[in-house]
Amino acid sequence: MLGALAAIGGLFAQAIATYYDAEVSRDQLQQSREDSEREQETQASQVNFWVEGTTTAEVPSPAFIHIVNRSPDPVSSVLIGFVVGDDGRVMLPLPAFNDLLPCTELIYSAAQLEVDTDEGASSKGKGQRLSEVGWDLDTMYFVDRNGIGWDRSRLDEPGLNHGGRPTAEPDGTIGALQAPQVKKADHCGE
C-alpha cells in the first residue's frame, strides 16, 4: 500500500514537472518568435525617406527628397509614392537605383523631377517639374535582404508595415531629369 502511494506521488510530481517544462518551452518559443520579428524589422527600420524644404508651389523654395538606407545590406524594388496636386498618387521608381545600396543616402531635387500622368488621368502637372506643382511624399516601398516587402507610409497610416505592397495604383510616374546626389549615410548600421 505504501509502495502504491509512493508511486502515485511520484506520478503526480512527474506530471507537475512535465507541465512546468511545457510552460517554459512555450515561453522560450514565444521569446524566440519575438526576437525573430525584431531581427526581421531591424533592417527595415534603418530605411527611411523625408522632405527637406517646402512642397507647395506657392512658396518658391527648393525642396529635396532624401532616401536613406542606414543598414549594412542593400534593399531592392524601391518605389517612392507622391501625392501630386489633385491627380492622386504617382510613383517614382528609382532610376538606375532600383537597389538602394548599404549605407547610402540619395538626395533628389524636386526641381529635377518631372510629373508624367497616365492617359485618362487628370493632366494637372503633366510635364511640369515637381517643384512647380503642389505635392507631398506619401509612401515608400522596398524589399529587404530576406525578400520581405515593407511599406513605410507618411500620410494614410504612418509607420512601417511588414509584408507591405505599394499602397495604391499610381496615376503616373515621376521622371528624374538628373541623377540624385549620392552620399554615405550618417549613423550606418547603428
Image (cartoon, helix red, strand yellow):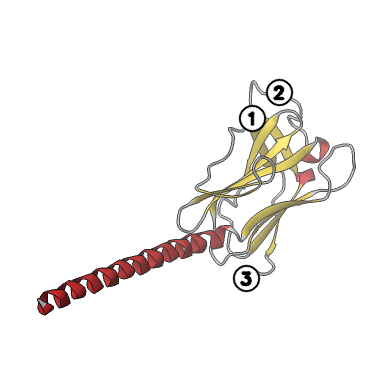
Q: Is residue 184 left or right of residue 23?
A: right
> Which is more foreground, mark 2 or mark 3?
3
- The count of marks equals 3
Residue 164 spot, x, y in % from top left: 53, 45
Q: Pick the quarter of the image with the C terminus.
A: bottom right
Q: Judging from the image, what secondary structure is the residue with disc 3 in?
A: loop
Residue at horizontal 61%, vertical 33%? 170
| Residue position for label 3 | 190
Residue 92 versus residue 101 in the image, above or below: above
- Image quadrant where residue 46 sits: bottom right
Give the residue number, with chain letter if any, for mark 1: 171
Packing grade of label 2 (10 A; few <14, some 14-19, many >=20) is some
Q: Earlier in the sequence, mark 3 or mark 1?
A: 1
Q: Which amino acid type corresponds to the residue marked 2 in the rendered image?
A: Ser
Q: Which residue is mark 2?
A: 122
Label 3 – label 1 distance at C-alpha? 37 Å
User: Where 125 sits versus 149, above or below?
Assistant: above
Name the N-terminal-most of marks 1 and 2.
Answer: 2
Q: Residue at x 84, y 46 (%)?
A: 54
Question: What's the residue type where badge 1 is placed?
Answer: Asp
Q: Quadrant of residue 156?
A: top right
**Distance between the Cα atoms at labels 1 and 2?**
9 Å
Could you say which is closer to the camera, residue 171 or residue 181? Answer: 171
> At 66% across and 46% down in the image, what residue appears?
158
Q: Position of residue 172 (x, y in %)?
A: 64, 32
